[in-house]
Amino acid sequence: MNLAARYEIIDAHKFPRSGAFVFAPNHYSEIDPVVMGVVAWKLGRLPRFLAKASVFKIPVIGWVLTRSGQIPVQRGGSVRGSEPVKAAQRLVQKGQIVVVYPEGSLTRDPDLWPMRGKTGAVRIALEQGIPIVPAAHWGTQHLMERYSKKISLFPRKTIRVKIGDPLDLAQFRGRSLDTATLNEATAVVMVAITALLEDLRGEKAPAKRWNPSEHNQKETGRFEA
């Protein structure tokens, strides 16, 4: 990854060097987890990810994911048993971080702006009493386009990453974690991520965030399908 891209990390000092937190970036390329994993590593932390449960069934890869502490999640958003809850508790106890993409899948927005968010990231943060650190990256699409199976290695790409201020979501603590509360907290996170991406791109995002259901798009799989 260092050969394929150079990384310009803006406001790296906002990335906590210790303690448990949820790292919440935007998501528009299949290679995003590798890119943000490299960023977290460069900033001195070993990331854990929420990964599709089906990947854990792949020989060797599944074993590596399990042994490295990655967290299985079923497609469509439901969890496999109580493993994500238990994993989140272990993360807090050990002061580790977990990378969660609030969008849940690659954005369907035609211009790669963040789409509507799902509640997984804020649920973990609120249940475990840990902050969310929003982030945005831009340039990854030149390394691997959305839904592409090919990585463009040459010429070397530049990926810009901007780290946001930790969001402790204090205004939501103590409230019932019902759908309304989780959606409201998720909106706060998505606003923060979008603002970071606006700074990186030097342009404004659409006034209304893309919602797949309003465009007859599936929640999983290629958005063209």
Image: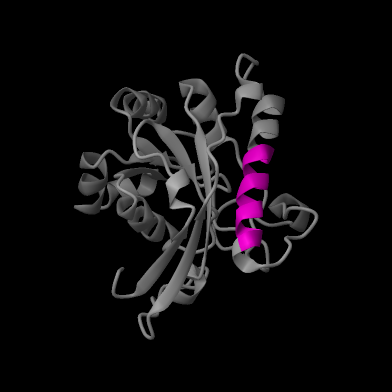
User: What is the total number of numbered labels drawn onto the structure image?
Assistant: 0
Does 55 sit above or below residue 50?
A: below
Q: Position of residue 131 (x, y in %)?
A: 50, 31
Quadrant assignment for the N terminus: bottom left
Point 63% across, 46% down: residue = 192
The residue that appears at 61% across and 14% down in the rendered structure is 174
Q: Judge by depth and name the residue closer to the eye, 182 or 62.
A: 182
* Corner quadrant of residue 152: bottom left
Q: How is the model colour-coded?
A: one colour
In this rendering, would 126 be left or right of 189?
left
Side (left or right) of 115 relative to 48: right
Residue 7 appears in view = yes
Residue extending farthest right: 207
User: Where residue 73 sits in the image (x, y, percent)?
Assistant: 43, 39
Magenta highlight on residue 7 = no
Q: Which residue is drawn at 74% across and 62% down?
A: 204
Task: Give the x, y percent position of residue 181.
Answer: 68, 25
Whether residue 195 is in magenta: the answer is yes
Extreme-bottom residue of the structure: 155
Q: Is residue 108 visible?
A: no
Dominant secondary structure of the magenta stretch? helix
Q: Is 127 placed above or below 107 here?
A: above
Quadrant in which the C terminus appears = bottom right
Identify whether 95 is placed above or below 151.
above
Q: Where is residue 220 in the image (x, y as percent from the top left)?
A: 56, 53
Name the residue nearer the viewer: 75 or 85: 85
- Tell me which residue sits at (35%, 53%) in the image: 37
The part of the chain drawn in magenta is 187-199
Q: Looking at the rendering, which quadrant does residue 93 occupy?
A: top left
